[in-house]
Structures are given as C-alpha cells and as structure tokens.
Image (tube, coloured by chain):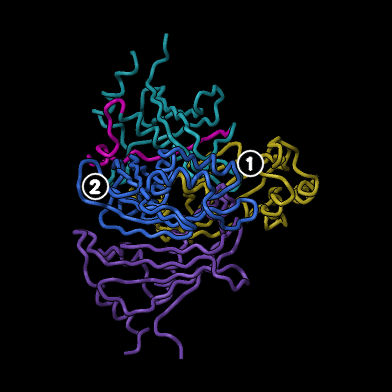
Chain colours: A blue, B yellow, C cyan, D purple
Amino acid sequence: MSEPGVSSTTDIRVRYAETDAMKVVYHGNYLPYFEEARTALFRSIGLTYSEIEREGFYLVVLEVHAQYKRSAVYDDVLHVKASLRELPAMRITIHYEITRNNEPEVLVTGETVHAFVNAASGRPIRPPKEYLTVMQRYFPS
Amino acid sequence: MSEPGVSSTTDIRVRYAETDAMKVVYHGNYLPYFEEARTALFRSIGLTYSEIEREGFYLVVLEVHAQYKRSAVYDDVLHVKASLRELPAMRITIHYEITRNNEPEVLVTGETVHAFVNAASGRPIRPPKEYLTVMQRYFPS
Amino acid sequence: MSEPGVSSTTDIRVRYAETDAMKVVYHGNYLPYFEEARTALFRSIGLTYSEIEREGFYLVVLEVHAQYKRSAVYDDVLHVKASLRELPAMRITIHYEITRNNEPEVLVTGETVHAFVNAASGRPIRPPKEYLTVMQRYFPS
Amino acid sequence: MSEPGVSSTTDIRVRYAETDAMKVVYHGNYLPYFEEARTALFRSIGLTYSEIEREGFYLVVLEVHAQYKRSAVYDDVLHVKASLRELPAMRITIHYEITRNNEPEVLVTGETVHAFVNAASGRPIRPPKEYLTVMQRYFPS
C-alpha cells in the first residue's frame, strides 16, 4: 500500500553560478532547488502559487531544515522530490529528497514548514478552503 | 582640478556563497556589489534609496556593462568605487571600479544605466526635482 | 539565406529566489540565465563545458553587457536564446535574447565575451583545436 | 556567570538582490548571512577560514536549520550573532540569532553543523589540533 500524500519530482541542472570554491553546489543554493520542486508539486495538483498570490495570500516559510550527505557538482542533473505527507493544517510541511541521475544515493534531504498569510495584513490564516479541498483528495480519511 | 561629479567607495568582503567552482567570484555576483556601492553613493549625498521607493518611485536598471580584468577570491576585501560623472537627465549612468586591499590593479570596471519610473504606472519619468537638486550640487554649472 | 553561426534556445522558469522587491527578476539574475543558455548552446554542438574543464581549460568571462527592456516575473517561462555569430578567435562573443512564452517582445538582450585560459596557469590561450574544429562547422568559409 | 563558549556579531546591510517579490529577504539568503557571521566568529578567535583551506582542510556544512519569525527588508542593518556553545568534537555546531538595529525582537534563528574534512580525500577528520587548542580556550574544563 502506498503512503498517503502526494509527491512530485523536478529535474534541475546545476548552474555554474550555484557552485562554490569547493567545486560543489553551495549549501544555501539547495533552498531555491527545494522551492522549485515545491512549486512543481503544487502545480501538479492544480495549485499554482502565482495564482495563490493573485488571490491575496502568501505561503511563507517558517522553518527550513537541510541535511547534506553528498555533494553535487556543476552540470549534474538533480532529481528533487518534494512530498506532502500530512494533510495541511495551520502549518504545512514539505519533505525533500535529492538524488542524481541514475544513482541510488541520496545527496540532500530537507523539510520546509509553511503557513498561509493574508498578503495585506501579514496575519497567518488557515489554508484557504479551496486549497484544502484540493489537498484533501490525496489523504484518505 | 578635480573632475565634476561625486563618488563613494564601499568595502565588501567576498562571501563563500559568491565564489564559484573556478575558486573566484562568479562574474554575475559583481552586480550586487555594484548595487551595494551605488546605494552607498546615493546615501552619501543624502538620497536614501528605500526613501525614494516610499515616495512612489523606482530607480530601475536599463543597462549593465562589466569588464573583468582580474579575479577576486573568497575573503578578499574589495573596494567598490561608484561614481556619478554627469548630471542625471532622463538616464542616469553610474561608473564602477573595483580594487583590492592595498593593490593598485583594477579587478573589475562597470557601468549601469538607470531611469526613474513611477512605481504605480511603471512609466519612466524625469528624476524627481528634489533628487535633481541634490545631485546638481556636485556639478558646477 | 540564414545567417552563419549557431544558436540554441533554453526554457527557464523564474524562481521566487530570483525575484526582488520590485516583484520582477533582479537584473543580476539574468547572468545565470545567460550562463545556462550558453552551456546548452555548447552542448547542442557537442561541446560539454564540464568536459572542457576536465581537459584543463576554463572558458572565462571577460565582459558582460545586458540591456533590460521589459520585466519578467515569478513563474514566467523564459526562452533564452544564445547565439554564436562569429567564428571564435582569441575572444568568443555570445549573444542573448530573452522572450516570454508566446510573446513577440524581447525582454532582455545581452552579450558575453569569453576567452579560453589554461586552468593551471591562468594564461589566455587560443580555443583548443578540437573546439575550433567543431565550431568551424557552423561557419561557411 | 556567563555561558561557556564564544560569540561574535556581524552587521550586514540587506541588498536589493537579497529581497524577493514578497518585498522581504528571501529565506534562502539568510544562509550566506550565517556564513558571513560564522567566518567573522572564527576570525575573532584567530582562525581564518581561508587559512584553514590553504592548510588542506575544508569545513563542510552537514546540516542547516533556520526558523523565520519576522521579516527583514531592503536596507535593514541586521545584527547576525554567531555562537559556539560546545567544545567542537567531530561535529561543530554554530548557533545564530538575527536582530535588527535597536529592536529587541529576534527575526531569525538558526544552527549549522559542520565537520572538518581533508580537502584532498574528502574524508571527515577531527578538528586539526591547532584549531582545537584555540577553541578550548573558550571552554573552562
């Protein structure tokens, strides 16, 4: 039986700009990779983040955690898997796992914790009902 | 006799994040250095860019030019000189010159061309009168 | 008759990380877009930049020029066209043109000027013969 | 009685390049701020990171954790405090706390976990003895 939730994998090719003098991807540059994979995950279930903003909400980042196990280098094609494993409540946690072309070893894992806020007031709010409805489809009750 | 205009030098220490796999500063990362020096130049003559935005204007970038002559590396303290050499009209050009601690050789030179726009409409406008007044002080007529 | 030379277009989706407080792509972040398109151009003619480095050469950036005409925003899919219009000599110039999904207007244009250097000595060298041979195919003599 | 350990505070002015379309500092851009503060912490006790690399060691990042409580905006001067609270063993943990000019509220907290590796082999090693000696000064036994 598969786990509840939903996930999506995005391929990202490492830019020279993203490497550092150790000749590997700078640790901070995995956060934009997480972001790109998270956006793709939302898009894959019909939620477009730019649309969310146009409706007056921001999905802000409350917390980030990343564990670096192996290095990626320039021109690597990385597979960045983003997963939503629990039905979102006030806080939404996304999990990440990065591997490289045809290799089983995980390079980087991570989690980000988010909340919806009202873009005008900056106040945290529950996920807007329409987003919750979409997300609930992926969690058997 | 000194040249007309005004200049300001900002010290910037190179972060590891700003280097690349050639073990030097990534060429694109000099643009934020130019930006930091430009902001300091404006601040030095009493113009605070964040204040400009609060008044409803953006100073947008129309053009960037950079010439890379020598490399900078991690932990270098760079001196980034920004100069305004001509009285701003519709277009404002800033010149840059980057040197390193106690060395005469120029590492990078550059120019950026800007225009004021109305933040609401996005339309280009002449430099607001109060900014022009401040800037005119540095250009003998 | 088509122009001599070779070009390649890369699609790049704008990350949130690449925007700034004007709600558009930060001007400096087009340089990594140029880089990604340049790498794809070289790959399209059988030259892999990571391979070039493994053989002991760097292709360094001597000069960058960018003209910003219109803004791109978060989640835009940009088409970044990189072109090699002249047979490379000591200096190699690449031209760029960025458009957006299904729109004719050009957002950003640019040029970068490069030279091969010996990675060990840092000295500029002519393009290694094998690269010149590949590139010559695209220029009728 | 003061806590054992050592800390150092670095002032960093937020660049426009570091903001995003929410008009605040992009969450990923705090990692270079942590890095700058960590480097300054080491420098303050006589350990220069660029020197460490010249001796053949890398201090790699194994883990990053950041908690975002309040936003910083363009031109803010941030105080980034980095602290070493435990005597380094195989793993070295640095703690961070970011505040803003004259305000008591903490904006961002974080931790990074590091290990020394042999730059040539990539293998984790104990902190070189001379570094350990320096660091021990700050921890009463």
Residue D141, position in %: x, y? Answer: 31, 90
**Image: C102 above or below A27:** above
Residue A80, position in %: x, y? Answer: 33, 45
Count of marks placed on residues = 2
* Residue furthest to the front: A141
Residue type at tag 1: Val
Residue depicted at 21% across the width and 59% down the height:
D122
**Image: C121 above or below C98:** below
User: Does residue C66 show up magenta in the picture?
Assistant: yes
Dot 2, crowdedness within 10 Å: few (<14), some or many (≥20)?
few
User: Does residue A95 show up magenta in the picture?
Assistant: no
Residue A137, position in %: x, y? Answer: 40, 43
Q: Nearer the viewer, residue A137 or A122?
A: A137
State the image quarter where residue C85 is shown.
Answer: top left
Instruction: Write down the region rendered in magenta.
Output: C44-68
Q: Which residue is mark 2?
A: A1
**Marks 1/2: CA–CA distance:** 54 Å
Task: Look at the numbered disc 2 and give the secondary structure of its residue.
Answer: loop
Label 1 lies in what chain?
Answer: B
| Label disc, if present, on residue B60 of the rendered structure | 1
Residue type at tag 2: Met
